[in-house]
Image (cartoon, grey):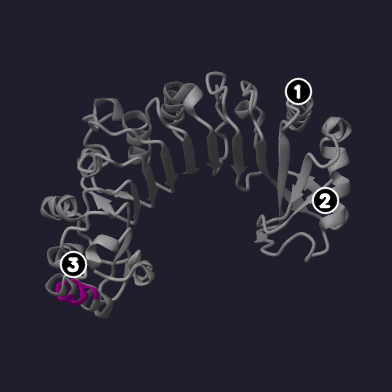
Amino acid sequence: MLPPTRRHLFCRISLNSPELCKTFTDLLDTSAKASTRVAYYVRHLSLFQVNTMPSVEGVLMRLPPLPNITSLSMTDYSTLETHSLTEHTRYRLYEVLGNIERLSLHGISFIDTNDLGALLSGFPRLHSLDLQALYIHAPDRHQTAVHSKPVPALEITELYMSFCPPAAIQYLLHVVCGPKLRTLSCEGQLTPQSEWDSLQNALLKSGSCLEVLKIFIDPVSGVPTPLLDCLSNDRLREIQFFIRRADQTRISPLMTRLRPHDLKSLHLRFNAAWGPDNVTLLLDDREMTDHILANLVQNMKNLVLILDIEVWEGTFHWTRTITWNGAWERVNRALDMWFPQLRQEAPSGRLLLSCVLGLQSRAL
C-alpha cells in the first residue's frame, strides 16, 4: 500500500490528453500488480472528450473500478456530431464509477430526455448535479416532461443548470427535483411559460427544504417576467436574481411572494446604461422594487442586500470594475434616485454595492 503522505497525489485525476490517459491507465495496471491500490485513492475524476483524445468509452475500458470515487466531471469539446454516451458507455460508467455522489456534465449529447434520465438512474448515490450546455438531439420526441419516464431512487439535493435546452430544463425540474432539494440554480433563457411552470413546480415540491435559489434570466423583448411564488420556501437563506441586459425588465414579480424567515443574503443584478451626464437603471418597475426591497430589509433583521450594477454604454459592455472605469461615485449617487426608500430604511453595512463582475463589494 502507498504511505499516507503520498495518497493525496491521486485524489484528483484529470484526463485531458492521450498521453495522460495512457500514463494513468498504465499506472493503475502497475499499481494492481504491486498491490499499491492507487485505484482506491481516486476521489475525483475529470474526463475530457476532444478530437485528439481516445473516446470516453475507450478510456473507461482500460480503467478498473474506482470504489471510493465520489465525483465525476465529463466535458465534450469534440466537433464530432455523435451522441457522447452510448448505452455501452453508460454501463461501463456504472461498473467503474458507480459510487459517485456528484456529477458534472458539460457539452454532453443525449438522444432525448429519457436518455439523460437513463444515465442518471445508474448512480444510486447521486445527490449533486451540475449540467452545462447539454445537447438534446430529439427535444420533441416527448411532448412534455411530465410524460417522461421518472428517474428511480434519486434524491437530488443540489441542481445547477447553465444554458441547457428547454427540453432538458423542463425534464430536470419536473422529474429530478424533489422534496429533498436544497440548492437550485438555473441560468439561461426561461422563455416559454412551460419552463416557468416547471420551475414553480420544483419550488413547490422542495418546500421548506430549499435553502439556496439562484435564477439567472436572459430576458426576451416583449416577454413579461412571470410571477414566482416562493411562499412555500420559508427556509431560504440565500437568493440570487440576475437579469442580463434588457431595455425593459421587471423584477418585482420574482420578489412579490417572497417571505422566508431565515434569509441572510439577497443578491440582485441590474443593468444600467452609461450616458454622458447620468446613469440610467434599465428597470421598468423601479418604484415597486424599491418598496419591496425596503420592506425586506426592514422586516428581516439579518438580511444583507447586494446590488450588482452592470454598466453598459451602447453595445459595449464594461468588463472592468466600476471603480476602475471611474463610474463608481456616479452609480453610488444614482442609488438615491433609483431606490430612495431602500436607502432610507437600510441600516449601515446591510446594503452592498457590488462591482460589475462581482470582484469587490463595498458597504454603503
Q: Can residue 248 be seen in this view?
A: no
Query: Disc 2 to disc 1, how far (Cα)?
Result: 26 Å
Lateral position of residue 132 relative to residue 42, left or right? right
Residue under the image location 21 percent in, 66 percent down? 37
The amino acid marked with disc number 1 is Asn
Q: Does the magenta stretch include residue 251?
A: no
Instruction: Identify the secondary structure beneath mark 2.
Output: helix
Where residue 216 sits in the image (x, y, percent)? 54, 43
Which residue in the structure is indicated by mark 1?
A: 299
Q: Give the range drawn in magenta.
A: 24-30
Lateral position of residue 358 relative to residue 83, left or right? right
Classed neighbour count for the residue bearing mark 1: other residues with Cα under 10 Å, few (<14), some (14–19), many (≥20): few
Where residue 64 sits in the image (x, y, percent)? 15, 62
Q: Name above or below for residue 94 compared with residue 58.
A: above
Instruction: Identify the secondary structure beneath mark 3.
Output: helix
Label 2 close to label 3 by CB (< 8 Å)? no
Q: Is residue 29 magenta?
A: yes
The amino acid marked with disc number 2 is Val
Label 1 close to label 3 by CB (< 8 Å)? no
Which residue in the structure is indicated by mark 3?
A: 59
Which residue in the structure is indicated by mark 2?
A: 331
Please tell me whether mark 2 or mark 3 is closer to you in this view. 3
Decide which of tag 2 and tag 3 comes sooner along the chain: 3
Classed neighbour count for the residue bearing mark 2: other residues with Cα under 10 Å, few (<14), some (14–19), many (≥20): many
Q: Can residue 162 be seen in this view?
A: yes
